[in-house]
Amino acid sequence: MPITPREDMDALVRRAGLSLKSTEIDQLHEGWALMAPQLERVRLYGRGREAEPGHIFRPDVFGTEEI
């Protein structure tokens, strides 16, 4: 994902209807530079989250004497 130019970030902020100060847009732009690479690593297609192993608490495994 290419780095979003500041001018494009300004347009995205306007399109979202946000009224931000220039310093706030600068912070958003800096944060986006860190977030964009992470979004590329997120799996968009493939196995659903139900295919991932879950952490399940099973109370039947423990006896009542331990409660």
Image (cartoon, helix red, strand yellow):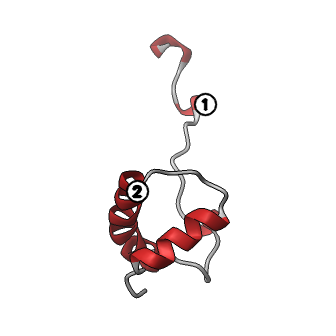
Residue 2 drawn above or below residue 23: below
Disc 2 target residue: 22
In terms of depth relative to the viewer, which is nearer, 8 or 45?
Answer: 8
In this view, the residue farthest toward the front is 22
Q: Is residue 50 left or right of 53 when viewed as pictured?
A: right
Query: Contact, CB < 8 Å: mark 2 with mark 1?
Result: no
Q: Nearer the viewer, residue 3 or 60?
A: 3
Q: Quadrant of residue 41?
A: bottom left
The residue indicated by pointer 1 is: 60
> Residue at 45% of width from left, 51% of height from top?
21
Amino acid found under the numbered disc labelled 2: Ser
Residue at x-position 54% and y-position 53%:
54
Give the residue drawn at x 40%, y 74%. 6
Residues under labels 2 and 1: Cα distance?
57 Å
Task: Mark 2 or mark 1: name the one nearer the start of the chain.
Answer: 2
Instruction: Measuring from the top left, give residue 56's x and y in whole percent.
Output: 55, 44
Q: Position of residue 14 (x, y in %)?
A: 61, 64
Residue in the foreground of this view, choosing between 11 and 50: 11
Residue 8's x, y, as percent?
Answer: 50, 78
Q: Residues within 10 Å of mark 2 (few under 14, many from 20)?
A: few
Element under disc 2: helix
Image-quadrant location for residue 18:
bottom right
Residue farthest bottom in this picture: 2
14 left or right of 67?
right
User: Which element carries disc 1, helix, strand or loop?
Assistant: helix
